[in-house]
Amino acid sequence: MNFLTRDMAITRKKFLAIILLFSTSFAWFYVFYNFFDDLMIPTISVNTIWYDVSVLLFFVFTIISAFIGSFIAERVNRRKFLFFWIIFGILVILPIPFISVEELFPVFGALVGFSFGLGFPSCMAFIAESTNPEERGRVSGTAILVSFFLAMTFFILLPSLSLGTIGILVVLIGIKSITLLSFLLDPIDRATGEPKRWRFIFAYKDFDYYVLAFIIFSVAAGLANIVVGSLYSDPAYQQVSNLAQAIRFVGVGIFGLIAGIMADRIGRKKLILFGLSSTLDKVVWYERIGNHFSTGRHKFFKQL
C-alpha cells in the first residue's frame, strides 16, 4: 500500500476505511447476483417466470433506491445512514430459508435490490469527499481491485465447498459484517456545505459525458452476460466456467487499478474515450462468439 499512498493526502486509515466500505459492498453484490439461484431455488420449486421477475425487480429497485438514497444522504448523518444501510441489508436476506411461496420471490428481489442501492450513492460520495482529484483514480482503482479479488475468491470457494442455502447466506452476512470494520477506522462523516440541487448537477458540462460512458459500460456488460448465458449448454464451457469467471474478475481488478493510476496522471477523459472505443470491439467479438453458440438466449442477443 505504500507505493499507492506515499504521495497522497489521504490518511492510511481513511484509505482502508474506503476499501472496506466500498469493496465489501461491491463484492457482496457480485456474490449475491451470481448465487441468486443457489440461494432461492433450493428452498422451493420455482416457476421460471417468478424467478425472472425477481431478478428484474432486483435491478429495478436497486436503481430506484439509489435515487432515493441520494436525496436522503444529503439530509442525514452519513455515519448513521450507512450503518443503517448495512444492517438493513443483513436483515433483508435473513428470511430466505423460510420462503415457501414462489409468488414472494419478486417481493424478495425488490427488497434486496432496494437494500443494496439505498446507501451506495452515499458510499461513492464518501470516496469523492475523502480524496482530491490527483489521487482519486488510485483510491478508486484499488477499491475495484479488492472488490473483484474478493468476488473471485468467493466465486471459486463457494462451489467447491458445496454450501447450501444456509451456508451461502452465512457467507453473505459475513461479507456485510466486514463492512462494519470501516466504522472503527474513520468517522465516515459528510463534508460540510450546502447540498447541491439536482438541477445544478445536470447543468455540469461533464455530467452527461460520464453518465453516457457508464450507461454504455452497463449495456456492454449486460450483453456480455447474455452471451455468457448462452454458452452454458456447451459441455466444454461448463468445465472451465468457474476458472474463466475467476480470470475475468482478476482482469477487471488489475486493469481497474492500472486505469486508476493512469487517470491520476493523464486524466479521465482519455481513458473513458478508450473504453468507449474498446466497447465497440467487444460487441464485434461477442457476435463472433455468438455465431458459434447460436442457441438459447443468444438469439435474443442477436435480435437486440
Image (tube, grey):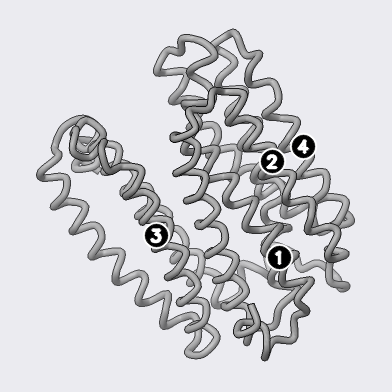
Q: Point out the frontmost of discs 3 and 4.
A: 4
Earlier along the polypeptide chain: callout 4 or callout 2?
4
Q: CA distance from mark 3 to mark 4?
A: 31 Å
Q: Nearer the viewer, mark 2 or mark 1?
A: 2
Query: On screen, 205 above or below 177?
Result: below
Question: Where residue 273 sits in the image (x, y, percent)?
Answer: 37, 76
Identity, as a three-letter code, of the amino acid under mark 3: Ile
Tell me residue 192's x, y (percent): 88, 72
Which residue bears the numbered disc 4?
88
Check whether the beta carbons of the residues at disc 3 and disc 1 lie within 8 A of each other: no
Residue 28 vertical position relative to residue 257 in the rendered view, above or below: above
Q: CA distance from mark 4 to mark 2?
A: 14 Å
Answer whether labels 4 and 2 touch (C-beta < 8 Å).
no
Side (left or right) of 190 relative to 109? right
- Percent across and percent down for residue 158 are 50, 36
Disc marking residue 216 = 3
Q: Are marks 2 and 1 in contact (CB under 8 Å)?
A: no
Cα distance between the residues tagged 1 and 4: 20 Å
Q: Residue at x 63, y 30 (%)?
A: 169
Q: What number is the disc on residue 174?
A: 2
Q: How many marks?
A: 4
Amino acid bearing label 2:
Gly
Sequence-wise, which precedes: disc 3 or disc 1?
1
